[in-house]
Image: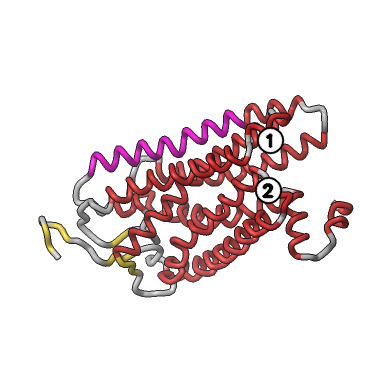
């Protein structure tokens, strides 16, 4: 359908990794295994935080939100990726592309804010433990989690609604999903408004939360080093080490994608980073927290019913 000298596309073609047919088989197996592990790990983590009364704390409230985001994030793009990797017609309809673009970006943006909230929670728990239950009460935690969701979803709604109104001069997306930056490369003309909003949102959701996280951990590290209890230091290092691992993986990939000059030469690298960012990080989140956290391991053993809870404490 022609209107105002540009085409309104009803279907898009996803180039993905079609130039490397042998690689597609490997990527299919890799993505499928990572996706199933993501669903299993994050679902289990959500389940134990709901069922185990000892995990009704701010840290696990935020962790449950993080797991739910990871499930939504991967489910928005990975099933389409898996189908297209095994198909010669790598297509997606306009409405599917719009939903995929919104959900992926919204979950990613929300997670940026939530990771900063989790860093603040750890700061209060370690640097001000006597007032922790007062400062991080149930109402405050619910408000902080809500702010994370509202901020991520509303900023993404603005970005995607504007991006979808831009006239496109093609329907071949050089990506394996409807990633917003890849779609905007098809624009007939550059939109100053969209570019400005994308830049402002990227700065607000990436460097600023990262700065707040770094400041929180400077105070946390200082407090840990002053602690006279070796057990307390080990527990704090274990919890914060897991969080920092997630932060480094997540923000490192996001910064490399959204705050660098656009260039066609690095598009292939962007796709690899997006794949790792999209399937590896969500899969690692529950593994990092569960394997490095004694409370989570205890709750998992209790849920599985392998050994009585009192024996779990004795052995650990």
Residue 131 placement (x, y as % from top left): 69, 29
Where in the figure is residue 316, as x and y percent of width and height?
Answer: 84, 51
Q: Secondary structure at mark 1?
A: helix
Q: Is residue 46 visible?
A: yes
Q: Is residue 291 above or below residue 130?
A: below
Look at the image and say whether residue 215 sits in the magenta stretch. Answer: yes
Q: Residues within 10 Å of mark 1 (few under 14, many from 20)?
A: some
Residue 151's image quarter? top left
Residue at (63, 36) in percent of width and height: 136
Q: Quadrant of the N terminus?
A: bottom left
CA separation in Å, label 2 and label 1: 12 Å
Q: CB under 8 Å between callouts 2 and 1?
A: no
Image position, residue 144 (x, y; %) = 53, 39
Q: Quadrant of residue 178?
A: bottom left
How many labels, in total?
2
Query: In the visual, does 101 lie left or right of 6?
Result: right
Rendered image: mark on residue 223:
none
Q: Residues within 10 Å of mark 2 (few under 14, many from 20)?
A: few
- The correct choice, above or below, for 285 with respect to 87 in the image is above
Residue 221 against residue 30 in the figure, above or below = above
Residue 292 shown left or right of residue 14 in the figure: right
Q: Secondary structure at mark 2?
A: loop
**Magenta span of residues:** 191-216
Q: Earlier in the sequence, mark 2 or mark 1?
A: 2
Q: Which mark is residue 56?
A: 2
The majority secondary structure of the magenta stretch comes to helix
Which residue carries the number 1 mark?
133
């Amino acid at each position: 359908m022609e209107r105002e000298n540009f085409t309104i596309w009803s279907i898009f073609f996803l180039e993905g990794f079609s130039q490397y047919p042998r690689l597609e088989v490997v990527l299919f197996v890799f993505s499928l295994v990572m996706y199933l592990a993501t669903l299993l790990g994050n679902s289990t983590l959500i389940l134990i935080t709901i069922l185990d009364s000892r995990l009704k704390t701010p840290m696990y409230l935020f962790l449950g939100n993080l797991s739910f985001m990871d499930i939504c994030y991967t489910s928005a793009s990975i099933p389409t990726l898996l189908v297209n990797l095994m198909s010669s017609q790598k297509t997606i309809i306009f409405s599917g592309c719009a939903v995929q673009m919104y959900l992926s970006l919204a979950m990613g943006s929300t997670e940026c804010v939530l990771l900063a909230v989790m860093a603040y929670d750890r700061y209060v728990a370690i640097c001000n433990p006597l007032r922790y239950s007062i400062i991080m009460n149930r109402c405050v935690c619910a408000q902080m989690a809500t702010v994370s969701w509202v901020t991520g979803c509303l900023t993404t709604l603005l970005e995607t609604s504007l991006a979808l109104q831009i006239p496109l001069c093609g329907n071949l997306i050089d990506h394996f999903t409807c990633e917003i930056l890849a779609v905007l490369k098809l624009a007939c003309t550059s939109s100053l408004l969209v570019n400005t909003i994308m830049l402002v949102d990227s700065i607000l959701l990436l460097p600023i939360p990262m700065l707040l996280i770094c400041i929180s951990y400077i105070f946390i590290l200082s407090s840990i080093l002053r602690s006279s209890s070796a057990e307390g230091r080990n527990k704090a290092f274990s919890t914060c080490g897991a969080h920092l691992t997630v932060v480094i993986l997540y923000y490192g990939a996001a910064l490399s994608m959204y705050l660098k000059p656009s260039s066609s030469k690095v598009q292939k690298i962007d796709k690899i980073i997006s794949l790792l960012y999209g399937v590896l990080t969500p899969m690692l989140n529950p593994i990092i927290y569960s394997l490095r956290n004694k409370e989570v391991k205890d709750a998992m053993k209790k849920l599985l019913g392998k050994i009585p809870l009192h024996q779990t404490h004795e052995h650990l």
